Every structure is written in C-alpha cells, then in structure tokens.
Amino acid sequence: MPFDLPAVEALAPDQSSLTAASRLNKPAKWSGLTHEDDLWWGEAQGSGANPYRTVVDGDNVGYKCSCPSRKFPCKHALALMWIQATAPESFTEGTRPDWVNDWTGRRRTTRTTAAPAEDKSIARAADPPEPAPADPQAQAKAAATAARRAATTRAMIADGLDELDRWIVDQTRTGLAAFCDHAPDRCRKIAARLVDARAASLASRLDEMPSRLLALPTEERPDLAVRELGQVVLLTKAWRADPTDPQAARDVGTAEQRDQVLAHPDAPRSTGFWEVVGEQIRTRRDNLVSHATWLMALDPQAAQRFAVLLDFYPATAGRRDQVFTPGAQIEATVAFYPSAGPVRAVVVERGDPPTQTFGWPPVRADDAYDPLSQCADAWAGVPWQLEHPLTLPAGRVVEAAGGRLWWRADVGGAGLPLSGDHDGSGALLGLALEQAVGLWDGFRLALLAAQTPFGRVDLA
Amino acid sequence: MTGPTPLDETYPVLRDCWIAGGQAAQVAPAAWQPLLEADADECERRLLALAGQSLEVGLRPDLGPHTVRPVLPLLALPGVPAHVRPTVRRVLKAETAPGGGGSARRTLDLLARRGFTVNPLDWFPSASADLPEVYRPWQEWVADSAPTGPTAGHHPAGTPDDWDHLSGPGRRQLLRRLRDTDRAAARQLLDQHFAGEAAPARLALLEVVAATDLDDADTAFLRSLAGDRSAKVKHLALRLLARAGQVDASADDVAELCAFLTVGRKKVLQVSAPRTKTAAQSRRRDALFETVPLAALATGLEISADDLVTAWSTSRSEHAATQALVTMVVETGTTAQAEILAANLLGHDQPDLARLLRPRMGSDAVRAGLGTVLGQGLAEVHAWCHDDAPEVDLDPGAVLDSAAFAQLCAQESATTAEVHAASTLALLCPPDVAAQAVPRLRAAGVSPQYLDMFVLSAALGPLSEGAR
C-alpha cells in the first residue's frame, strides 16, 4: 500500500523531523530512487563522506536508514515516503539490491504503529524557520567570541606542539631502540597531551604510530620511527608557519565539515566516472572505526587520479552498510578538501550507474620506470602524508628472501615490498597483474585491486 | 635500501646514532651544516625531518634475489561473471563454514555444470582435493610449487603419456575419464602404473574403478590384486570380484548368516533380521554380511536377490543389520538391486541409508528418490543428497509445492546445518525453478543466507548467457 501524506505525518516522531524531511523532499537530493512493488529505496547525501541508504516498505510498514540518527523513522525515511506520496514517478522500477534484500530478510513483519499526530503537521513543515531578530550588537559579540575562541585554540595548540617538539628530541636522545620497544606507552602519553591541547588529528596520528611500527620486522622499525618523527616535525613547522593552511590545520586540529568543504573556494572539484578500487576499515586505538573508500578516476586525462572518502564512527556502532562496493563504477562529482596535494574528498553528487564499463587508465612503463615517481607532488606539497595511492603497470607478485612478497614490474624490474596483509599461499603468486592499484606507506605496498587474465580482482 | 646518492652512506650513520641515543648533529655531513645553525634540540628536529624525507624520496627498495612462479593457467571454462562473484563468495563461505562438515565441491560442480569456474581469488584448490576435472591445471600448478612436486616446469595435458607429471587428483581424473570413454586404455594404464603406486594411491585408483560398472575384462586385473601388499586394496578387490559374481562364498558362512534372518511367507514375502540375544551375536552377524555376497545369501534363503531387497523389513530388523545389508548391496549387488533397496528404504523414512546406495544407482532411480524425499521434508532431502546433490530436470511444482520447500519458507533461524540443507534443495533446481523460488522465499521473509544458493543457481542460468 503506497504512503500518503497523513500517514507520513502520523509516522513522524516529532515536528522537527518533518521539518528536516521537508528539506530532503526533492528527488534532486536523492540518487537511485527505485521501487519494486511496495518497497521503495534510494540514497541521500548526508553529512558523512558516503551517502545514506534508505529503504521503506509500504506494504508492511517499516523503514531502515544507514544514517546515525536516533529518531525513528529518521528524516531520510520520512522524506523518501514523502516523495513516494507526492511524486511517485520519481522512482524507477527495478530489482532490489543486496542491501535492501538484507534488510527485508532480517526484519520482522510486524505492523509499525504510528505516533500520535498531535503537535506535528505536514503543513507546518514547509514553514520557514522563525527568523532571528537582527541584532548588530549580538552579532559583533558572537564574532568577537569566535575570534577569541580561535585564538585560544591556536595558543593551546602551539603550546602542545612545543611540548611535542621536546618529546621528539627526548626520543632520539634516549635512543630509538628504546622508543620502538615502548612506543605504545610513550605515544599514548603524548597523544593524550595533544588531545588536551586540541590537536586532535595529530594526537590520533601519534596514537596509531605504534601499530604501524609493530607491523614491520624489528630491523626496519627504527627507519619507520625516523620517517614518522621527521614527518611530524615537518607538519608542526608547516602549522607554525601558517596555522590557517587548510591541510596543516586539518592534520593538526580537526577536519572541516562537509558543508565547509563544499563552500570553500579553493576546494577543487572533479566530475567524471570513478571506480571504487578498494576500502580499508581499521579500528583505531581510540575505539573509532576509520572507513576509507578509495576511488580512481577513469578518465586518462583526469587531474586528480585518486580520491579517498573517509568516515569515522564508534566501534560500538558495529559495521556499517557498504555504500560503495569495491569494483563498482560510478559517475560522480567529488569535492576535494583544500590541499597542496588533494586526496581526501566528499561526494557532491552521484549520478546513475554508468551503462558501460570503463577500462582503467593506462600506466606508462619502460626500463627506467619508477612507480614512486607518482608521489612527487605529494612529497613536495604535503611531505607528511602517510599513504600514497599508486597505479602500477604490468607486474607480478614474487617471493623474495625470507619468503617476503614483493610486487615487481615486468618492464624495468622495479620492485616494492608488499604489506603483511597479503598471503602467498593462494593464487596471488601466479597472477599476471596487467595493472594494479595500491597504497604505498613508505615501507610497504598494500595492493587494493588489479586487472588480471581472470578479470578485475580485489586484493585489499 | 640502495641508491646512487650519497644518502646511502649518510643516512645509516644518522640512524645508528639515534638508535643508540645521542645527538646526530655531531655526525652529520659537512654539506648539511648550514642547515643546522640553531640550538641543539632544533638541530636534531631538522635532521630528523631531513633524514625522514631523504629516506622516502631519495632511496628505493632493493628487491634482490627472488623467485617468480609460472603464470597461473587459464581454465577451459570461463570464470563466473563479475556481478555473480559476491554471491559465489558468500555461498563458498557458508558451504565451508567450520563445523558444517561441508566442502566447496558441490558449488564447484554447480558452476562447472553451468559452464563456469570460480575466480582464483575467491577460492583456490589444494593439490590433493578431489575436484571437477576443469580445475586440474590449477592443481598441477599448486603441485608444482610443492617442495617435492614432481612436475616442476611441466604443464601436462592430461593424457596417459603425462602420467608421471600428473598429481594424484589428475591421475584419478584421467583414469575416470578413460573408464568412461576407453576401457582398454584404462586397463592398459592400470597394468602399467598401478603396481608402482603407494598404497593410498592404489586404493584411490581402485575406488575409481569401483565407481564404474565392472565388466568381464576387469576380472583378471581384480584377481591380480588378491596378493596386494595393502589389506585395504586386497579387501576392495575382493568386494569388486564379489560384485562381478567371481567369489564363491563359504557355504558355512551363508548358512550361519541365514540363521540370523527370518523369512516370512504369509500373504507377502518378508525378510528381517530380528534383534539378537547378545552383542557378540550381533557383531558376528554383521561380520558375515561383510563376507557373504548378496547373491549367495539370496540362494541360501531360497529366494531371488531382487525379492530379498524388496522384502527386507526395516521396521522388524535391527538398524545395524539394515545398514550391513546396504553395504552388502553396494559392494556385491547389481544396479537394479541397489535401486530396489533404495526405494524400499526411502519408503520407510530411511534417507540416510538410502543415500549410501546412490553411487550404484541410475539417474532415473535417483530422480524417483528425489520425488519421494521432496514430499517428506527438507532434512530428508539433505540426507538423500548431502554433498552430492545432482541437478535434475524437475518441474517447478515438484519443488515449489513440496513439503521440503514449505519447510524452508517457514524457517526462522539460520544454523549452518539448516543453510546446508537449503543449499541442497537449491542445487537440485534447474535455473528456472531456482529463479521462481527466490521471490517466494523473499516474500516468506527467510534469512538471506537461505537464498544465496538459489540466487546463484538462477544467476548462472540462461539469463547469464550474455555475460559469458
């Protein structure tokens, strides 16, 4: 049974939900609006890097959304029902995808009871919010407060970085051998001090350093310590030189909100076809899950070859629904966070799935080919960047001394050691990698995906 | 790390100083000194930044000596379409789940029947697994990589001349193919190579022979195994000779076994093995079932072998005795007798025992058995088919209106065993029937895990032709 407006009104938990839904009540705010019988679904771009997936069941009333809202139904579900009630032609008929199937398979088919319709109304949802009375004095006061708060934050961060400077020298003075042995404890302490100093991103980076350190064999750990401590020095110097530099401010303090990125005049945008080449889901020591989705531009002439969408959520929230499936090709406009070496991005708009499959852009390879030459811009612009996405020409995974796996180019023979996540007991050592994509962290290459005679394969 | 720049020499000096603890500015090269005009702590930080950046930008990993494996060969059948791979992965994960007792085999059989193979990154074989023949090149590739692999650098085509280069599964597949297509070549192969194999390999090859119909020409070979060094090989050879009617049972043994059985001739013929008085008697009876051929037992009871298996009463017999009779028929009965006994057992809700007879049954009888168990329930279907679910030309109604499908629609939980049973039902379905089952199961709200094998079967049907 399709929804009607009185039903939407009745299901809304409160007036503010209806008001919020009214802002999403436009098909243009959605992508992939589809229905199968009385099951309606679509994707709405929210404040996270990835769009929210929403599905509503008109037959046996129910709804599900991947947004973190505690309201039930959330504004996305309400908006989807609203569009269905007022503009059902916005939905194309289609077959339900796996994530919808998953929900319909798990849900109980019990009737949802609507909350009383008192104190909420569709009619009032479209009302503009009560305009705040203009008060120049109050505005000036607010601006002054914000400026004072920013100055205080900068001063606190500067103090925190001074302490970090001393801490770094202490590590070299007392020996990196000891640092490698006690890194979890030492890094946790300085990270806590940086959190107090409002340098949250830098704190998190230092808190995660031991896990990167321990992933390497003992003999390579001092090298990684030198590289990472050196990068932290460069980052702190960049911040001191210009605390308003977006990349430095982001990597020391906190990242901008999505709306700030979209409104930023220096945030480059790129529209075209992208392939989801892989994702990395890591649980950090602070119990946040970092979910990175790597996109590769399929246009050979694209100015920005890679974009990474980052989402963070509490580990206690469990694994989120996948919005982007590795291997999927999408048409999208992405906006990059302002940077001298832009990689992090948000999806501004996502088009319908492409009707054809695009090949990967070709990779040049000759005897002098150096795969790490792709990092040159990042090394110059953001020399503290931890990971660099690479496209790799035809090559193989080979077994070197000690059973360690390496990627080796067919032409020229350049080689990069692989991260410990790769297993040589299966077919990997026999695959002819016609092209590959990976992440280079300065010591190890984590392969994300490759084109092979057996088709495209995920290697992450 | 190596490289053509002086960093090769500079960086290790700085690093070694920091590892031990100390001020690296004192050992920094003279060319760097202009950058180090600051207080001691700032000098160390600058050196760290320089060294870290140098390490990343200026030095390159040195691969050194390494081994390159041969390229994994393409198989004779294409891989499944990319959009089906996630379903294949889910199905294989469920089929091989710990504690489920399943294997990848029946999924691989399904793919091969529909003209596809699995992607090597989704599943990869071991050298010794018993798999559809299409995967032999991959198994040979795996065998190549074993330290003792006999076939290094050689990619055998799977002909009798390649025997020495084939792995165990490859040899069994070759023998199986020759038994089906060229019995003389198969016998020649056994004459040449059987004696030179180790005991487990000899037994495995003889089991290949046992899985096919025996003919008169096999008798000489089987007789030659009477003196085999392996007791298991010798025992199996004797059972096969018995099946071929070439073994004379001891008259005393036949008489003793007959004494354990009761033949009722009122109204209808009924044969049963009543409960024995002692466990020792029971053990003796079961031992006699192992040595006396079916034909000899029937003669001793003064009835035909067909009548014996038709008239066997499962309700009046001890379960162990019925089980022993099933083994006897598998090893010494004819195809017709195996089919009669299977129908008898299925009619009396004994699909577990009936399944043991399936290797000896023809496809029509297997299909008839399916009709029976579909009407009984999901567990009975799973017991009848288990790990060897054949796809048969079933009508949609035979599945979708069956008691087994109705049970599946009513499932609430999704344990490993229940998912395996659902997958068994899916494997029996032709693609069009699987496609019709999917929306019904979704409408019933069953767990998605129950759907995966149906979805896979439907996806690999005629609709996927364009993707090939």
Image (tube, rainbow, N blue to C red):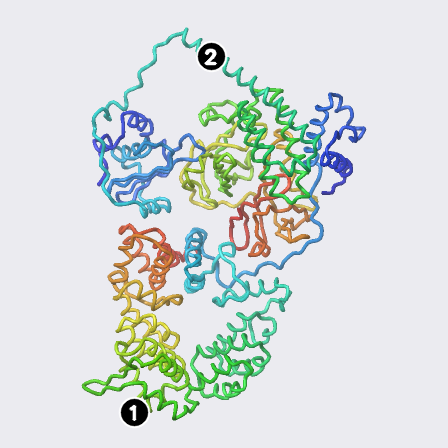
Going by the numbered disc 1, the residue's amino acid type is Glu
Residue B6 location (% of width, % of height): 78, 36
Q: Are marks 2 and 1 on the same chain?
A: no
Q: Which residue is mark 2?
A: A145
Residue B66 location (% of width, % of height): 68, 54
Alpha-carbon neighbours of circle 1 within 10 Å: few (<14), some, or many (≥20)?
A: few
The residue tagged with tag 2: helix, strand or loop? helix
> The disc numbered 1 marks a residue on which chain?
B
Q: Is residue A386 left or right of residue A3?
A: right
Relative to B205, say whether A312 is above or below.
Answer: above
| Near-viewer residue (B304 or A262) | B304
Going by the numbered disc 2, the residue's amino acid type is Thr
The residue tagged with tag 1: helix, strand or loop? loop
* Number of the label disc, if any, that sits on residue B302: 1
* Number of the label disc, if any, that sits on residue B231: none
Which is in the foreground here, disc 2 or disc 1? 1
Residue B145 location (% of width, % of height): 61, 62
For this orientation, the residue located farthest to the top is: A137
Residue B404 location (% of width, % of height): 28, 62
